[in-house]
Image (tube, rainbow, N blue to C red):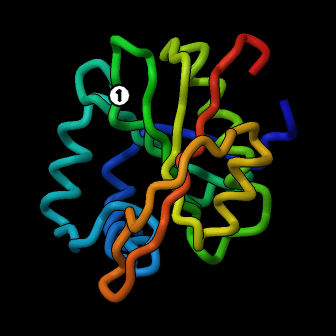
Amino acid sequence: MMEQKARLRAMEPEDLDFLYAMENDHEVWNIGNASVPYSRYVLHDYIANSSNDIYNDGQVRMIVEDSERRTVGMVDVFDFNAQHRRAEISIVVHRDFRRKGLAMSALEQIIHYALHTLHLRQLYAIVSQENVASLVLFDKMGFERSAVLKDWLYDGDNYQNAIVMQKILQKNC
């Protein structure tokens, strides 16, 4: 494992303002599947009712902290399929903390968690072909580009292709 620049932890009620800012950032909407704002009430309810158990919730969200314990991002493991032991993954780091190795460190930890704790066989991400930074990150972490989804993402003005990135998890992860 590489040096841990980031630390993953469970969501806490104190994360509400950070989640509200990130979930309502239009820049993030253009790279993911969200396209509507989330209210504080909905996010408060999500934090309060999340068991952080992928078998109960169908997903796990973890907060990413830097070495100074500042909240810098979040990682989601979602669309969990127990039968096939796979899930989709997404990661977002606040723009002020990008290009510092935090996403790579967090991704390495969530891969280890997915394999050794959740016992998944596969993780995948669907990444806009315009999101070069994320494509490079997933490439560096051993994800393979397995498919192009034509006109998959709509940013309100244009359609963008998405790349399916897959990683088969093995015990040396």
Q: Residue at x 44, y 38 (%)?
A: 88
Q: Please determine whether, in this image, residue 87 is positioned above or below residue 33.
A: above
Where residue 20 appears, as percent x and y from the top left, is 32, 68
Please identify the residue farthest to the bottom as the structure is shown.
Answer: 157
**Residue 4 falls in which quadrant of the image?**
top right
Where residue 161 appears, as percent x and y from the top left, is 48, 66
Q: Is residue 1 visible?
A: yes
The reply, left or right, for residue 21 in relation to residue 146 is: left
Q: Quadrant of the C terminus?
A: top right
**Residue that numbered label 1 is attached to:** 80
The reply, left or right, for residue 113 in relation to residue 5 is: left
Where residue 89 appears, as percent x and y from the top left, is 49, 42
Q: Residue at x 54, y 31 (%)?
A: 123
Q: Say what secondary structure mark 1 lies in.
A: strand
Q: Please determine whether, in this image, residue 26 is positioned above or below residue 32.
A: below
The reply, left or right, for residue 80 in relation to residue 8 is: left
